[in-house]
Image (cartoon, rainbow, N blue to C red):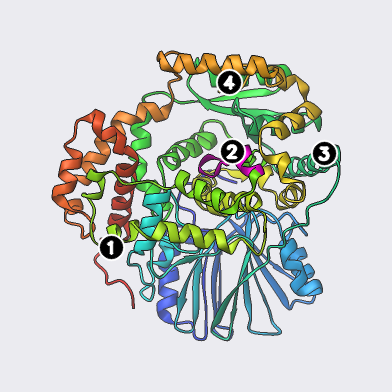
Amino acid sequence: MQPHTPLETLGLVGAVRARVTDTDRGWMSAALAPDEASFERMDRADRGLLLAWRRPGTAPESASLGNSVAGTQHVLVAGRVEYPSRSADDLANVLERDGESAWSSIAGPCIVMAWSDRDGEYRFFRPASGQRVLFYARVTDGLLFASDARTLVEHPEVDARTDWSSAADHMALGHIYGEKTLFRGVQRLGVGEQLVVSGGDLRRESAIAMPECVEESRAASLDRIDAALQEAVKNAWSGVEQPALCLSAGLDSRTLMAVAHRQGIPLVCVTNGIEGSIELRLTRQMCDALGATHLSCLLEESVVGGIMEGIADVVSYTDGEGTIQSANMLYLTRKYRSELGLERVIRGVGGELLKLSVAYGYAVPPELARDGDDAKIRQHLFHQLSYSLKDMESQSIRGELADSFSVVPEQSFAEEWSALEPFDSDAIGRVSQLFLRCYLARASVDSMRILRQSVDLAQPFLDERFLHTLNSVPIELRLDTSLQIELIRRNCPALLRIPNSNLRTRLDAGPVRKWVATQSQRVARRLGLGEIDVPEKWLTARLDDFYRSTLSEERSLERAHIDADGMRRLLSQAESARSSSSLFLGRLATFELSLRRFQDRGRPTGS
């Protein structure tokens, strides 16, 4: 695979409709124009199919076309399929042989499209962990589809106007819920879902089949989890010459390191950090203990300018849903490939599913989880996730955004929570699924989309077969860090003797020692000691300037959803007072950039 320009890689685009038009063909040609030589195309007017996909090997976002032995079943795999077969041709044979029953078994970071010469039906499938995305837009006699939303909104039949309910979700909750996007006419296929197109009709079907909880001993559950993770790790390191584990001093990547070491995999690890930081020191200790190669992807204060320059690009290439974390990913993906020569990175994304008490905004305290009260858990999560507007903030917005902000996010959250009831009647089990569907497969996947533009990506904790095993063990095993510590002890106990970056004490330390370490850290933080200088902190001052300059421009103040006087008052506050609104201002500035990229283009929206 040759290096290429990051973020210029559309992987899949097409139309399925009763009659493919010249407008459709012109739209596709414009989408492919920057890199047309890297694409294969199919124009089957007799079947109402217009399709283009990036050739294998040209970029991580490539796709493969497969055909059954009989030549009647066709499959296009965007990404990497891992089960029930590893090739598109084999998968076509499986689908032809097993029919409907085969779909729920498909696993891997991929989107699968399939059709048969025997009928006019088309199916699109996104596996249960949702590591890849597919967007689609309904048109009068079928649909348009693509691996990004920004391509779809360039089609004249697609309504590119702002979906204000989505904007409210993003502002209040940090990401959008359900199948919505920031565009009225574009939807995102959900995890574990099929989109079926037949005769101009569309329907969505869930292929999720939650496993029954197995009644067994704790040791037996640990054995099954360990075995499933062994297979997922083996899979992640296979098929590429230069894989590297993204190693931090926390638990997730350390668990993967332990399992890979036990398998005898020659380990190359890369850590993002600042020279002299505790993170780099601890990860070097881990690599020294195991004889692994350690690479440092060093971040210095000078990189802040590069990260800032990339924010507008990130907003564009995440279809308006990007974050500052995504801007960091833009910087890292370029450095991984151009300076370190990496072809694939393995990340511990999803490790929170093994310790739900620390799952970011979806974290549930063990005592509340054990209580199992549905209403209390739901209320706790929404309160934890939602952003409450301060007086001056509420006075800075108006119109549809203000109206939606007060009502829609809670409705979106409640709908998503209720939608999970058929799959898991247990409240804490639904928390796990909610975290996977709404955070990992919605917010995290945008950062991973950026990372994947330059390097291939493997995420063993999101391996569908591993998740199936994890979901079949008692939920009590997954409430705190004890499961990951046990997995490390089983596979490489030496890694328990090295502290993590938060607690600064051995992972196998006793309760008293951990309590003392925790209290010491709290005292140090109160005294302003022991702070680690990280890129996010370097960015703080620059971001404040960026938010103010963006939101104070006349074109921002003239928006229908902005109260100009209220915004000026908010931005004129002293820096110390304004810092409490940095999250709100950051999300609003990001939204403004998305409007400039997608709305201010001088063409009518809608059809």
Membership of 368 in magenta stretch: yes
Give whichever of discs 3 and 2 has the lower sequence position.
3
Q: Residue type at mark 3: give it.
A: Arg
Q: Would residue 118 be found to the left or right of residue 322 on screen?
A: right
Check whether the beta carbons of the residues at disc 3 and disc 4 lie within 8 A of each other: no
Q: Which residue is mark 3?
A: 218
Q: Which residue is mark 4?
A: 503
Q: Nearer the viewer, mark 3 or mark 4?
A: 3
Give whichever of discs 4 and 1 has the lower sequence position.
1
Q: Residue type at mark 2: give it.
A: Pro
SS for callout 1: helix
Q: Would residue 70 be found to the left or right of residue 441 on screen?
A: right
Q: Position of residue 284 (x, y in %)?
A: 62, 18
Residue segment shown in magenta: 357-370
Give whichever of discs 3 and 4 has the lower sequence position.
3
Residue at 59% of width from left, 14% of height from top? 516
Residue 14 sits above or below residue 317 on the image: below
> Which residue is at the front of the view, 287 or 351?
351
Q: Residue type at mark 1: give it.
A: Glu
Please tell me how crowded label 3 is: few (under 14), some (14-19), or many (20+) other residues with Cα within 10 Å.
Answer: few
Q: Position of residue 66 (x, y in %)?
A: 70, 67
Q: Position of residue 534 (x, y in %)?
A: 44, 25
Q: Residue type at mark 4: give it.
A: Leu
